[in-house]
Amino acid sequence: MSTCQTTQHRLPEDAGNNTAAALGAGGDGLGSNESTALQDDLVILTGDRDQTDLIAFHLEEKGGSGLNFPHKATAAIADEKLFLHDGTSENDSATEPIASTAAAHCRKRNCFSPILDFVEVLIPYGGLLSNVFSLGSVTLGGGIISMPSSFQTSGILMAVIYLLVINVITIYTIVLMGYAIKITGFRNYEEMALGLFGRGWDYFVGFIVWLSCFGTAVAYISAVTSLLLPILEHAPHTPEYLKTDSGQKLLTSMVWLGLMLPVVIPKRVNSVRYVSAIGVSFVLYFVVCVVVHSCMNGVKLGMRGNMRYFTSGNEAIYGLSIFVFSFLSQCITYPVYLEQRPKPSIKQLTIAAALSMSICMVFYIFVGVFGYFDFADDTKAAVLENFDPVHQPYIMVAYVGMLIKICAAYSMNMIPCRDFVYYCLKWDLDTNPYWKHIIAITIMALVTLICGLFIPSINLALGLVGSLCGGFIGFIFPVLFWMYCGNWSLRTVGIWHYLACYFCIIGGVIAIVWGTIATIYSSFFDV
């Protein structure tokens, strides 16, 4: 063990002798063979016999809480590995001493160390603020730049009602998923579907989640093109080739290679929390820019042209699909909940979900209302195409900020895609060599790039993802997971939870059936 590791943790003298005993006791019914297997797993995970003894001792101090099933024991081993790496503990008295800043002491100090230490304190690993930024980052992205056109499609007041209702449903379903994770101990969609629904459902649920996140990632590639297009059109010395379709695809590919690919490589969601924080901050700046530009131009003209407060028919339902997509954040509930520190908490998850989703809703309303009033009937599918960033420097700053935000959201959506592929290949994220991980995630990201370069419209991608996948992920799956955890009935959960769950299921069915039909009809037939 290195000197740094030795100074972080101090083991009792008999901890090494009690490794198997700790695993046996922690296993709550695990046999000697299973205890030996878990002990071997510890050595594989840590790569160090001394660290194995430390984890075993820490599990013993916990009294084996939560290790009554083999999959929970394996999950606890992974959690204890994170405990070693992060220097945090659910029970500070378990070892003596355990430094909360062990990682900071181990890294080499340089001129940037004070800044990094301050940021670590401001946005700690697994803290409330980190969770708010993570959930906000995966939510804000392609949806916000399509919000004015969605208000145009649904009508101003109808769009606000949609956002209010979907915001409440999103917070509620995230909390339900937190309860399901706490009860079962399952660590991703695939494991939970297999454990609760049975064989075969793990691949169906995993595929829906993969399709949703893959489609969202593809939409973000299209969003990058939407960012570049106004700059290329308004810049006075832009080469003619870059104004062509192939030139725009070349620039989009360069942005993907230089900015988007590097942020999908880290294994942990909290590893990109700083990028998420910066991205969300730039979205706030973008919202301010839209409001200011609208107040200086379109708002003065009031309602005009075909601007409406309500719409009906396919238009109204098509707008619903975009709004459902804009709140899809349930896909990262598992890593957000499990990576919380000092320990996973439903209360912290609820607060983080309520804060992040409500802030996103406010952002959406401001951009939707003011962006629609600004451009009225000339509103583009991506509102970025309506601005002139070259001759308006403050808009150019917003464009750069949105590019950073899209990169952060892209990385968040690639995590569930990666998890499903790993599940199908029977790879473990913790033990999979980093070189193999890099190759796999690069291939996945490359496929999203290719699809994003040739998709006809960003709103088509967002609409299909929001209706077809959003109905399952945002409405149906979280409710069914909680129902199938056991002991769910009108008597045990109460009338409000009972009605809310069935409302979510009915809403999900409407989004899937009618939303998908409306999206396809509006994109290919209603021209």
Image (cartoon, rainbow, N blue to C red):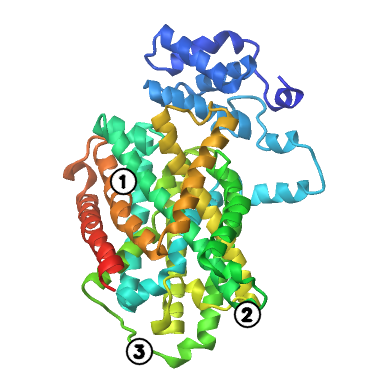
Which residue in the structure is indicated by mark 1? 478
Which numbered tag is attached to residue 367? none
Between disc 2 and disc 3, whose residue precedes?
3
Q: Quadrant of residue 373?
A: bottom left
Q: Earlier in the sequence, mark 1 or mark 3?
A: 3
Q: Residues within 10 Å of mark 3 (few under 14, many from 20)?
A: few
Q: Secondary structure at mark 1?
A: helix
Q: Position of residue 423 (x, y in %)?
A: 41, 32
Question: Which quarter of the picture shows residue 143?
Answer: bottom left
Amino acid at dot 3: Gly
**Residue reaching furthest to the left:** 490
How far apart, in angstroms, are the residues tagged by discs 2 and 3?
26 Å
- Give the camera-side residue of 316 and 461: 461
Please tell me whether mark 2 or mark 1 is closer to you in this view: 2
**Label 3 sits on residue:** 305
The image shows residue 59, relative to residue 293, as above or below, that is: above
Q: What is the crowding at mark 1: few (fewer than 14 residues within 10 Å), some, or many (at least 20)?
A: many
Identify the mark at residue 392; answer none if there is no mark. 2
Q: Nearer the viewer, mark 1 or mark 3?
A: 3
